[in-house]
Image (cartoon, rainbow, N blue to C red):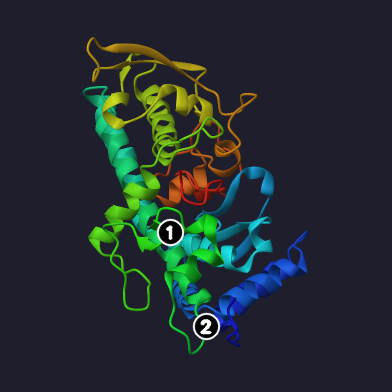
Amino acid sequence: MNNRLGQPGQAAEVLLQDLSEQPGVDPDSVRTLRQVIANSAVLGRQIDAAVSRGVLRRFARLGSARGAEGAYDPADRAVMISEDVLTDPAESAFVLGHEVQHALNSPTIDQSVSRLYASLRRNADTTLDYTAAIGNAIRDNRWDEAPANLAGWNALADFARRPGKPLRLRAILDAALTETRGFVEGSDPLRLVPGLTPNPDLTFSFSPENIETMARRFFDTRPRNQLSSFDYTNYYGAWAVSVAVEEHNRWQPGQLMRIDLARLGLSEKSMTQNGLQLNVSQQRYVDGSTEPPTYGVLRNTSAAPGRSPLMPQTELSRCFEAARLAAAGVTRSLPGSRPVRVRCAPVAHRPRATDPLGR
C-alpha cells in the first residue's frame, strides 16, 4: 500500500529489537511492525511520545485465542498485538495506533481508578448505592476508547498515503476495511459519518465533537447479532461492578447492595456472559431504577465454561492485583491477588472485528 521508504525512530527501534528477542515471536511479525512504523509518521510520533512519557516500554505478542486484536497492559506498559493482525500491515497500523493511544491515556485512567475506589468506600459507609461510582468509571473508559479509535484511524490514514497522490477515503477503507467501520457510510459517494470533522490530511483531531461521535459509534454500539455478546458498556461495567462487589464485601459483608443496572445501561445477562470476576460466589443487589425495583443475584462467572471468548477478563484484567492498586494509589492487598502483571482496571483492548461496517 505505502511505498514510502523510511526507518522507525530510535525509540521504536528499541521496542522492536526487544520484541524480536522475546520467545515465540515470529520474525515476520517484527518485520511487519517495522514496516508499519517506518511508513506512518503519525504513528512514529505517537510512539515517541508514549516512550518519552514512560507509558510504553515494550511490544508483545497477543495470542489469537484471546479474542482481541490488541491490548494495552499499563502495569507492564506493553502494547500487545494479535498474531492474526500482524499478518496485515494496514490492519496492524490501525491497531497499533489505537493501543498506543491507550498508553498515552493511561495516566488519566489511573486517576479514574483512584476516584472509583474512593467513591466506593464512601458509598459503603453511607448509602450502599454504588450506581454513580460505577457510572463514572464507565464514562471515563468511554472517553478512553474514543480517542484511541481516532488515533487508530490516523495511523492507518498516514500508512495508506502515497507520495505525490492525494489521499482519498476509498484508499483508507480499502487498506483496512474491518477497522474503518464506524467512520464511514454509504458507497457512492463514500462519506464520513455525520459529526466527524477531518483535518485536511484526513486525520482527526481530538475535538469534543469528534470524540463524542466516535464514542457513540464505537463504544455505545451493542451487539447486532447472536454471534457476539461483547459490548464496551458491559465490558467495563462488568469490571466496575466486580470492583464494587469486592469493596462492598470488604466494608459491608452480607448486606444488600444497590446498583441501578437499567440506569447505567447494563445487563446482568451480558455481564454474566462476559465474566463477572467477584470475590464471593454470589452477591444480592437491588436495581431501583425499575418499577417495581428488581432484586437479583450477581454470580461469579469469570471462569465459567462457555464464557464469551471476546471477554478475556480473567486472563487480561486481574482487577484485584495488588501491585497495580499500589500504582493507582491504593496500597492495601486484596483477596485473590496473584502475580500477574496487569492493571486493576480492565486492560483496554479492541475486540476482533467481524463486520466491516458494523451492521
Cα separation, mark 1 vs mark 2, equals: 22 Å
Give the mark nearest the N terminus, 1 or 2.
2
The image position of residue 47, as x and y in percent, is: 49, 73
Residue at image point 57% right, 39% down: 310
> Label 1 sits on what residue type?
Ser
Task: Determine the image quadrant of residue 293.
Answer: top left
Picture disc at residue 187: 1
Q: Is residue 323 visible?
A: yes
Q: Is residue 53 visible?
A: no
Vertical placement of 259 versus 232: above or below? Answer: above
Which of 306/359 is in front?
A: 359
The image position of residue 335, as x and y in percent, is: 52, 30
Q: Is residue 44 left or right of residue 309?
A: left
Q: How many marks?
A: 2
The image position of residue 105, as x and y in percent, is: 39, 60
Picture disc at residue 162: 2
Mark 2 Cα shell of 10 Å, populated few (<14), some (14-19), many (≥20): some
The image position of residue 135, as x and y in percent, is: 29, 36
